[in-house]
Image: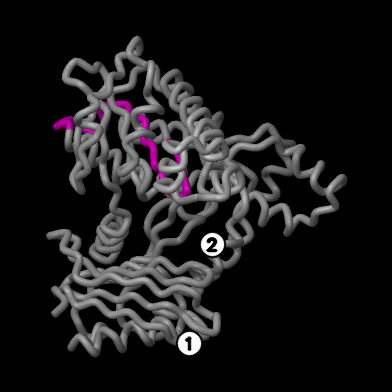
């Protein structure tokens, strides 16, 4: 059965639906699933409920059909999720623009505003809204809450949020740095403070969310003062398939000389660049194996990745003035020990010392990987965005 007060967390992509049911108090994961290739001739479904695993290949034309199937899978497990005592549905929404600064109860007006600001995240917000509408149609009596990736960074200092673009153009078209992965950065920075036994308001941190999408943040006293992603999730670190920082003039060059359309360039920058563009691979495990085997393309991609990462670590050290902790999280940050070691190599003069044995340990728990005499604590803190969304959703419906 599903524990009363549990939350259904939904992350809808353009052709996917990721979901989890969890108890925000005990942190128990009750159910977990992923539907991929929605709208294609055959969709892939993975559903897990209290140890029972189901995998299917089935045609699902849209997100509403995917949600209906998920509810049927719960019923096959003996659970009517619509009448299971859920306290809320928490939806991840990528972009809140200048409209949303906190988790928000979803109403018709909120839906309209998410749709209005969708041009700021055309690959994400429309899919998020599709998920919201599909779930609400089938679970109309369960309160739905939107939790925005950008909310944590909504109060970035003006100098960090502002592009040096014509001010009138920027104002008219809402051009500014919004930041993303905020749910993860906020959750991890608070967990790191708890692990160190300190108040988050009393420490300065650099948080490195390194996954297929990657971002870094400088967090002073629990509030971010800078982050690598900007108006879109394209800016900043080298990522699995995204360029990260790139000279804007390259867009003009590719348009004028190569004859590429804006759509072509968008696809190139977002889906065919980053590590994949450099070495044909965006699986970090495979890249590290290729580096160990002496593969030149993988070695070059790895060096470019580290160069960008180290540059931001250095920049944030200067911005913060004093750094108490550097925190690694997400798939690469949590599992790739070489990345952690190499990104901080040679920084002993700045009080940063990695313990090789601690760094080599793999664990699902938060852990210290710096030496006992390191002036800066270096931590690995697994992120849990689903739990953060669930807690935020309960906070809204309980208020």
* 264, above or below 143, in the image: above
Q: Nearer the viewer, residue 136 or 8?
A: 8
- Residue 358 picture quarter: top left
Is disc 2 placed on a helix, strand or loop? loop
Within 10 Å of disc 2 (Cα), the crowding (few <14, some 14-19, many 20+) is some
Q: Does residue 256 show up magenta in the picture?
A: no
On screen, residue 310 versus residue 230, left or right, reads left
Is disc 1 placed on a helix, strand or loop? loop
Q: Residue at x 44, y 80 (%)?
A: 134
Quarter of the image where the N terminus is located:
bottom left
* 259, above or below 156, in the image: below
Residue range highlighted in magenta: 196-216
On screen, residue 55 versus residue 137, left or right, reads left
- Residue 375 picture quarter: top left
Rendered location of residue 349, percent (x, y): 34, 10
Is residue 221 something that shows in the picture?
yes
Q: Residue at x 43, y 46 (%)?
A: 284
Residue with the mark numbered 2 = 124
Rendered location of residue 194, percent (x, y): 18, 37
Q: Which circle's residue, 1 or 2, is located before the other in the chain?
A: 1
Residue with the mark numbered 1 = 59
Rendered location of residue 249, percent (x, y): 76, 37
Q: Are marks 1 and 2 in contact (CB under 8 Å)?
A: no
Q: Closer to the observer: label 1 or label 2?
A: 1
Is residue 232 something that shows in the picture?
no
Within 10 Å of disc 1 (Cα), the crowding (few <14, some 14-19, many 20+) is some
Q: Residue at x 60, y 37 (%)?
A: 245
Q: Give the distance between the C-alpha atoms of the residues marked 1 and 2, in whole angstroms.
A: 23 Å
* 333, above or below 6, in the image: above
Q: Does residue 215 show up magenta in the picture?
A: yes
On screen, residue 121 versus residue 217, left or right, reads right
Quarter of the image where the C terminus is located:
bottom left
């Amino acid at each position: 059965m599903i524990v009363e007060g549990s939350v259904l967390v939904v992350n809808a992509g353009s052709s996917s639906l990721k979901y989890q049911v969890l108890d925000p108090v005990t942190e128990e994961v009750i159910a977990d699933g992923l539907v991929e290739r929605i709208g294609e001739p055959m969709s892939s479904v993975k559903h897990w409920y209290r140890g029972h695993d189901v995998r299917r290949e089935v045609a699902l034309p849209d997100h509403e059909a995917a949600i209906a199937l998920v509810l049927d899978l719960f019923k096959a497990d003996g659970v009517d999720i619509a009448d299971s005592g859920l306290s809320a549905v928490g939806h991840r929404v990528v972009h809140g623009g200048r409209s949303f600064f906190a988790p928000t109860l979803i109403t018709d007006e909120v839906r309209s505003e998410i749709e209005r600001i969708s041009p700021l995240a055309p690959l994400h917000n429309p899919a998020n809204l599709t998920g919201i509408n599909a779930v609400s149609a089938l679970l109309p009596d369960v309160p739905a809450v939107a939790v925005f990736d950008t909310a944590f960074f909504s109060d970035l200092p003006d100098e960090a949020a502002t592009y040096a673009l014509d001010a009138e153009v920027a104002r008219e078209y809402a051009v500014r740095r919004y930041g993303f992965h905020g749910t993860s950065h906020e959750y991890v920075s608070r967990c790191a403070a708890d692990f160190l036994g300190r108040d988050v308001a009393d420490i300065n941190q650099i948080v490195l969310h390194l996954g297929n999408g990657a971002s870094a943040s400088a967090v002073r006293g629990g509030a971010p003062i800078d982050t690598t992603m900007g108006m879109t999730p394209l800016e900043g670190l080298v990522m699995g398939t995204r360029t990260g920082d790139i000279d804007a003039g390259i867009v003009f060059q590719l348009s004028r000389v190569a004859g590429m359309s804006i759509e072509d360039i968008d696809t190139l920058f977002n889906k065919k660049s980053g590590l994949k563009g450099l070495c044909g691979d965006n699986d970090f495990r495979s890249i590290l194996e290729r580096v160990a085997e002496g593969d030149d393309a993988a070695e070059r991609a790895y060096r470019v990745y580290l160069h960008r990462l180290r540059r931001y670590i250095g920049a944030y050290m200067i911005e913060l003035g004093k750094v108490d902790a550097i925190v690694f999280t997400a798939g690469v940050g949590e599992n790739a020990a070489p990345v952690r070691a190499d990104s901080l190599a040679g920084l002993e003069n700045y009080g940063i010392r990695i313990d090789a044995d601690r760094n080599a340990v793999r664990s699902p728990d938060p852990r210290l990987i710096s030496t006992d005499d390191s002036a800066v604590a270096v931590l690995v803190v697994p992120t849990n965005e689903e739990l953060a969304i669930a807690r935020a959703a309960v906070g809204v419906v309980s208020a």
